[in-house]
Every structure is written in structure tokens, then in C-alpha cells.
Image (cartoon, coloured by chain):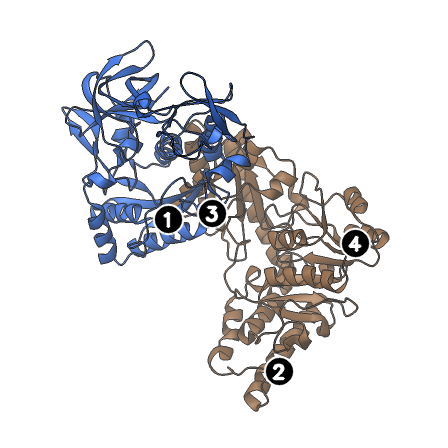
């Protein structure tokens, strides 16, 4: 039972089929000057146009990258390099943004109890010295959706010259991409979160934004991202994104019902032992984040893994050890509850049977660990 | 048996895991993340975790990482710093075994349904007259029974030392035969949370204020001053800031409160009794004529051990160098094979 779709989700079969010809037949480097290269180049350009269309973006502003982390690093470092100033982001951002922001002059903004940036604090953090503001579209741990319209209003009023970027890595599989994109100047995508392959993503940037590239060399992507194009990955990303966005409504309704069934069953069976971290109307359909105060999530994940349930807790450090969640900490969650956090994330391949078996496994594991005096 | 083997990323625990797999047990490897700070020798650098994971993959067993960094700081690092501040000489590896490996990890293992926790220590566990005993490792040069002396009967029922019957050479040979990447990895030295580059002085200096102390002889005559009494250990001979050329002088007493370090000649260092106020017994207390070891790589010396108001008193048969307060004193049976118990010198 795979309930870790926010970490990565299986590739869509259509995306797998779409990428295969570019591995062994249309294998040329698209920067080449011959017919095989031109065919690869055409595939890249067509994917660029389709992704731009889905986002309501100018195709010239779509830059292919190796994924979300590269896109986030590029825009933060790139904007600050072109226009020195302060970078601002909320505390519960993904580490790809947070660590990039912390490398330059920066201010971190507090979040509310759902993990949403506090708009009053955001306003206070912005000023004429602000060059870049980055606010994620959907939180990767707890699933909270950011009201980007409200964020944009604050940013435009308080720091009209600042670049507003959103890490939409967790947003593209649940929300209409154009709805996210219309509020921002730049946006990061990662293909493997919506049924594309790992190692490919995109950075969407409005033409008016001035920024320096992170990777220099052969001058691909109009000198904005050097490196040979991952042609097969780009084609597959395009197909996966198109399918995902076309199915948003139907998939969202079905998966939200499964998520509700999962969380309702846990609440019903475990009662006060379980806390639902964020109200469901504030988060995406596939996210079920709960906390079991007094239970240690490393033990819980171990027992779930043994029972065949793939889940996660917070982000892992380089060694693979669970780190205390900076997201829950920013939300003001007490340490004892945060230590018992469990993230179950559903995706398009999740079945009702998966959900029912996961409920049994979670109830069994939590009951067992609580019997072990809570400390395990 | 379902066994959780603690894998540090070193060769001993790699082969311990391999031995358990070979014996047909259901084995899971775990690497404990203990120290979040800088490290070069220890068991929690990312490279060491990589080694442990790769060995587990080669052996076909699951590998997990448990983050015990908070407990390690609370139970091992903070007391280590506090002990130095108080002028004593702690052994953090023993406290890590006591609180982390054989308590925290063992407790979690039990809750997760494991029958035993295994480590790569060079020590053996044998049953003698119905009692479980820690026996010195087969490789006497590598014996680690001293650092696992705190195991009680209950602990010993659920602990396994799969390489204790092997010599280090045999351990490396088995690792090489299995093609494990840790086969020729150097042994870890020293304290894992103190880097070779910065050293103990820098580590403690960031955490406690160093205070100066008067260095005096036994009559109280001032001989000089040391800048950091917190770094001085009983038995120490060098780096006391004393003028050279005189007779060899050893530290025989450290008093950070009074700001005084007492030095004397080698004879002054010798004592006939060592007190151990708190003991952990492996089974029932056993006293009388035993052999007693006071450092990880020291030799056990004959002594008569008697119960005291608190703990035990060790009456040495031959005067012996005084044990720095904070060091562990471990009692072995008269044949010098089995651990009977141990505690920290007062």
C-alpha cells in the first residue's frame, strides 16, 4: 500500500510511452545541426509550448531544469544576483527554497496554525529592499493550500519591484496550474510529483524578470540553463502534466473521498489519540496528515513498513534519519505531537482497498506503540 | 530470532550482521544518528551511514536510521561537559552504551517486536551456572567487555555480540570474503563527537568557561598555574605549565571549585583503595578476591572487593595508580574472564 505520493508518484503509462522513442530512436542532442537533432529539438519546443499553455504562460518563459530543487535554487540565487536585495519566504517553505533564501540576505515570515504564511507578518517583512518573495503553492508536509491571490496583493502593495515566486511542486497535481501561475512572476515544477520521470522539471519566469543563470556552459535554454536537454524527460513531463491537469476535477473528488474515508476511520477508531493536523478545507485532496501525540514516528513508520504501508513523517536528513519537522514547528505544534506526525499522501493510483488496509495497519501500529507506554 | 543489529558503518558491526544472517536469524540493520555536530571518527557521519546501508544491501537485509540525537545530547554529551566542568574524567562511550545502545535502542527494539539487539562489540555472552555473563572477547587486544560491563541479566537475555568469538583479523577476513566495503576501514578511535582537528579543548571551550588553577605540591607550595583546570586529569603528567627539568610530577587531585591542582611524584599517585559509590551488578553482588580493571585498555589487577555503605570499596593487593574520578571500575571474576559488575569511581 503506497501512501507516499507526495514524495513521488508512479509515472503515468502515457508518459512512459511518450518518452521511450527519445531514449533509443530520437536520441540526438537537440542542439545539433542535423535532421535527427531537429526532431529532438521539435519535441522539446512542442513540450515547452504545451506546458506554457497549461500555465497560461509565454513559451519563452519556460526553462527546463533537472527538477524542483534546481528551479528553486536558480530563481532565488538568480534574482538576487541580478538585483541585490533581501529574499523573503515563510518558515514552512520546502528546504529547496529555505536553504537558498538562507544563503543570501533574508527575512523569514511566521506561519499560522495551518502552515499558511501570516499576511500581516508578510507585509511587515516586505519593503523597498525586497528583491524576491517565495511562497509555496501547497505545503509538501501538511498539504495546506496558499491563498496566492492574497499573497500577491500584499507583495504588490508593499514591494512592487520584488519578484514573486511560487514553488508549485506540490500544487500542480491538485490545482489548475494557470490559477497558481496567474498570481506570480516565477514558478517551479517537478515532473515526478505528477506522473512524470525524476530528474526533470521546469522554471517558469515572466519575461520582465531579470535573473542570472545558475548553470552556465553551452548556453542552452537561451543562456538561462546550460546543459544538454533531457529530451525524453521533457516530453514525458509534458504528457504527464497535460493528463494530470485534464483529470484534476474527477481525480480530486475521488481522492478527497478516499482521504476522508481514511482520516475519518482513524479518528473514529483511535479517538483522542489522533489529531488531524490541518482542516481539510484548507488543504489538497491527497493529503492526510495526522499526529499521534506520545507515539514516535520512527517506530510508527517501521511498523507500517513491516505491514506493507509506505508512509512518511517529516523530511529526512542526509543520513536518512527523521528530523523534527520545521513545518510543524513553524505552525506552533508542540514537540510531543510533532514527534508523532504521520504523512499519508494519496495519488491517482490509490484504491479504496489500499485505504482500508492502511487504516487497519495504522490502528494496529499506533495501538501497539501506545501499549508500549508511549515510549518506543 | 528477530534481531536488530546496530550498524555503525564499521567492520565489526558489518560482520556482526553477516554472522546473524548466516545463522539464519531475521535481521534488520539500524544506524543510530547520535550526534548532529561535526564528527570525523564517530558513528553518525553520513559516509558511515552510507557504508552501513550498503553493507545491509549486500547482506540482503533491511536497514533503517533512528534519530536519537536529542537523547545523545542529553545523556552523553551534556553529562560529559558537566563532568569536565566538575573536574572529573568521564567515559562517554560507556554512557552511550548504557543509555543509548542498551537502553533506548533496546527498548525501541522490544516495542517493535525484536527478540534481541546485537552490536559489533568484542565481547561474548555465556551462561555460567545458570547466570548470563559478559565474557572478555576472544581477541584480548580488542576486548570491549569493559565498555559493556553495565549489562544486567535482563539486558543480557536480549543482547547478542556476534563477533565476540572472533579475532579482529578474522573479522576483517570475513568482511573481505563477503566483499563488504568496510573490510579494510580503519577502526574508529576516540570520542565520536570530538573531531581530531578541533580536539577536546575546542569542544569544551565552546561549552564551558575554562578557569585557571594554581598548581601546588602536596604541602601546598605553588609550582605554577594552568589556564584550564577543566582539561586536567588525575594521572596527567604533561602540559601543566610547570618548568621542565625537575622530577616527574603527576596530577593527584583536581579541584575546580578551589582552583587547585595538586601534583606529586609517582608514589603519591599510588593508592591502596578505590571507592565505587554506585555499582551496576550483572547478577547478584559478588565480592571478595577479584580482579579489577579501571580503563578500557588497562590490565585488571587483583583486589579484595568489599561492600561499602554506598557501592563497594576496592582494596588493591598492590598499590595502584589512582583512578580519575569519572572513570569506570569494572570487576571481573578471579579468572579474569567474566564481568561481575562495575561503576564509576568517586
| Residue carrying label 3 | B197
Q: Is residue B307 above or below residue A107?
A: above
Kindly indicate the quadrant of the structure image that contains residue A204. bottom right
Circle 3 packing at 10 Å, graded few (<14), some (14-19), many (20+), is few
State the SS at label 4.
strand
Q: What whole-number distance in Å separates the C-alpha atoms at marks 1 and 4?
A: 45 Å
Ranked by sequence position, the earlier of labels 4 and 2 is: 2
Specify the farthest residue to the top: B309
Q: Please tell me the numbered disc located at residue A42.
A: 2
In the rendered image, residue B34, in percent from the top left (x then y), is placed at 45, 40
Q: Please tell me the numbered disc located at residue B63.
A: 1
Label 1 or label 3, whichever lies nearer to me, is 3
Closest to the observer: B250 or A146?
B250
Disc 3 with disc 4 on a shared chain: no
Disc 4 with disc 2 on a shared chain: yes
Q: Please tell me the numbered disc located at residue A109.
A: none
| Residue carrying label 4 | A130
Chain seen in blue: B
Closest to the observer: B90 or B9?
B90
Q: Chain of mark 4?
A: A
Q: What whole-number distance in Å separates the C-alpha atoms at marks 1 and 3?
A: 31 Å
In the rendered image, residue A8, in percent from the top left (x then y), is placed at 52, 57
Q: Chain of mark 1?
A: B
Q: What whole-number distance in Å separates the C-alpha atoms at marks 3 and 4?
A: 40 Å
The residue shown at (57%, 45%) is A288
Left or right relative to B160: residue A241: right
State the SS at label 1.
strand
Amino acid at each position: 500500500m503506497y501512501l507516499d505520493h507526495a514524495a513521488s508518484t508512479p509515472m503515468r503509462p502515457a508518459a512512459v510511452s511518450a518518452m521511450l522513442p527519445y531514449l533509443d530512436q530520437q536520441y540526438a542532442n537537440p542542439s545539433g545541426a542535423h535532421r535527427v537533432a531537429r526532431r529532438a529539438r521539435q519535441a522539446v519546443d512542442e513540450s515547452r509550448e504545451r506546458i506554457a499553455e497549461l500555465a497560461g504562460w509565454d513559451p519563452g518563459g519556460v526553462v527546463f531544469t533537472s527538477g524542483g530543487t534546481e528551479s528553486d535554487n536558480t530563481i532565488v540565487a538568480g534574482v538576487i544576483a541580478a538585483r541585490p536585495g533581501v529574499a523573503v519566504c515563510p518558515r514552512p517553505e520546502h528546504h529547496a527554497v529555505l536553504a537558498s533564501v538562507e544563503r543570501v540576505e533574508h527575512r523569514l515570515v511566521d506561519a499560522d496554525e495551518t502552515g499558511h504564511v501570516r499576511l500581516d507578518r508578510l507585509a511587515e517583512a516586505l519593503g523597498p529592499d525586497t528583491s524576491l518573495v517565495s511562497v509555496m503553492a501547497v505545503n509538501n508536509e501538511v498539504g495546506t493550500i496558499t491563498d496566492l491571490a492574497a499573497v500577491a496583493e500584499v507583495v504588490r502593495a508593499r514591494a512592487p519591484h520584488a519578484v514573486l515566486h511560487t514553488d508549485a511542486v506540490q500544487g500542480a497535481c491538485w490545482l489548475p496550474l494557470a490559477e497558481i501561475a496567474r498570481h506570480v512572476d516565477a514558478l517551479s515544477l517537478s515532473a515526478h510529483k505528477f506522473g512524470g520521470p525524476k530528474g526533470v522539471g521546469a522554471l517558469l519566469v515572466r519575461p520582465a524578470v531579470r535573473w542570472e543563470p545558475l548553470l552556465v556552459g553551452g548556453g542552452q535554454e537561451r543562456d538561462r540553463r546550460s546543459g544538454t536537454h533531457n529530451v525524453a524527460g521533457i516530453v514525458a513531463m509534458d504528457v504527464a502534466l497535460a493528463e494530470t491537469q485534464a483529470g484534476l476535477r474527477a481525480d480530486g473528488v475521488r481522492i478527497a473521498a478516499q482521504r476522508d474515508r481514511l482520516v475519518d476511520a482513524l479518528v473514529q477508531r483511535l479517538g483522542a489519540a489522533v489529531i488531524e493536523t490541518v482542516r481539510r478545507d484548507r488543504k489538497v485532496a491527497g493529503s492526510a496528515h495526522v499526529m499521534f501525540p506520545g507515539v514516535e514516528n520512527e517506530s510508527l513508520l517501521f511498523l507500517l513498513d513491516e505491514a506493507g504501508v509506505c508512509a512518511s513523517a517529516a523530511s529526512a536528513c542526509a543520513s536518512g534519519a527523521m528530523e523534527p519537522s520545521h513545518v510543524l514547528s513553524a505552525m506552533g505544534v508542540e514537540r510531543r505531537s510533532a514527534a508523532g506526525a504521520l504523512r499519508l499522501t494519496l495519488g491517482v493510483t490509490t484504491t479504496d482497498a489500499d485505504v482500508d488496509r492502511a487504516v487497519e495497519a495504522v490502528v494496529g501500529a499506533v495501538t501497539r506503540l501506545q501499549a508500549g507506554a508511549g515510549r518506543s | 530470532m528477530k534481531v536488530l543489529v546496530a550498524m555503525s558503518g564499521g567492520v565489526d558491526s558489518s560482520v556482526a550482521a553477516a554472522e546473524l544472517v548466516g545463522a539464519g536469524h531475521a535481521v534488520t540493520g539500524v544506524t543510530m544518528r547520535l550526534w548532529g555536530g561535526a564528527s570525523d571518527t564517530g558513528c553518525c557521519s553520513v559516509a558511515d551511514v552510507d557504508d552501513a546501508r550498503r553493507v545491509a544491501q549486500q547482506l540482503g537485509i533491511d536497514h533503517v536510521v533512528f534519530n536519537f540525537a536529542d537523547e545523545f545530547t542529553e545523556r552523553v554529551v551534556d553529562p560529559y561537559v558537566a563532568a569536565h566542568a566538575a573536574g572529573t574524567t568521564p567515559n562517554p562511550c560507556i554512557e552511550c552504551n548504557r543509555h543509548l545502545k542498551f537502553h533506548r535502542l533496546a527498548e525501541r527494539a522490544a516495542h517493535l517486536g525484536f527478540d534481541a539487539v546485537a552490536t559489533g562489540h568484542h565481547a561474548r555472552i555465556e551462561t555460567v551456572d545458570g547466570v548470563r555473563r559478559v565474557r572478555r572477547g576472544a581477541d584480548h587486544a580488542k576486548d570491549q567487555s569493559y565498555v559493556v560491563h553495565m549489562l544486567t541479566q535482563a539486558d543480557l537475555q536480549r543482547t547478542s555480540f556476534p563477533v565476540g568469538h572472533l579475532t579482529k583479523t578474522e573479522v576483517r577476513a570475513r568482511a573481505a570474503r563477503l566483499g563488504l566495503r568496510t573490510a579494510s576501514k580503519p577502526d574508529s578511535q576516540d570520542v565520536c563527537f570530538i573531531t581530531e582537528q578541533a580536539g577536546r579543548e575546542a569542544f569544551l571551550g565552546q561549552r564551558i568557561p575554562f578557569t585557571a588553577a594554581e598548581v601546588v605540591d602536596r604541602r601546598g607550595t605553588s609550582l605554577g598555574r594552568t589556564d584550564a583546570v577543566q582539561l586536567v586529569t588525575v594521572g596527567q603528567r604533561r602540559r601543566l605549565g610547570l618548568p621542565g627539568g625537575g622530577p616527574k610530577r603527576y596530577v593527584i587531585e583536581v579541584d575546580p571549585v578551589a582552583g587547585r591542582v595538586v601534583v606529586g611524584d609517582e608514589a603519591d599517585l599510588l593508592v591502596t583503595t578505590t571507592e565505587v559509590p554506585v555499582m551496576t551488578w550483572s547478577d547478584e553482588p559478588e565480592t571478595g578476591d577479584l580482579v579489577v580493571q579501571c580503563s578500557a585498555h588497562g590490565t585488571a589487577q587483583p583486589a579484595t572487593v568489599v561492600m561499602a555503605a554506598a557501592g563497594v570499596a576496592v582494596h588493591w593487593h598492590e598499590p595502584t595508580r589512582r583512578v580519575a574520578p569519572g572513570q569506570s571500575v569494572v570487576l571481573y571474576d578471579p579468572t579474569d574472564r567474566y564481568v561481575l559488575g562495575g561503576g564509576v569511581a568517586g
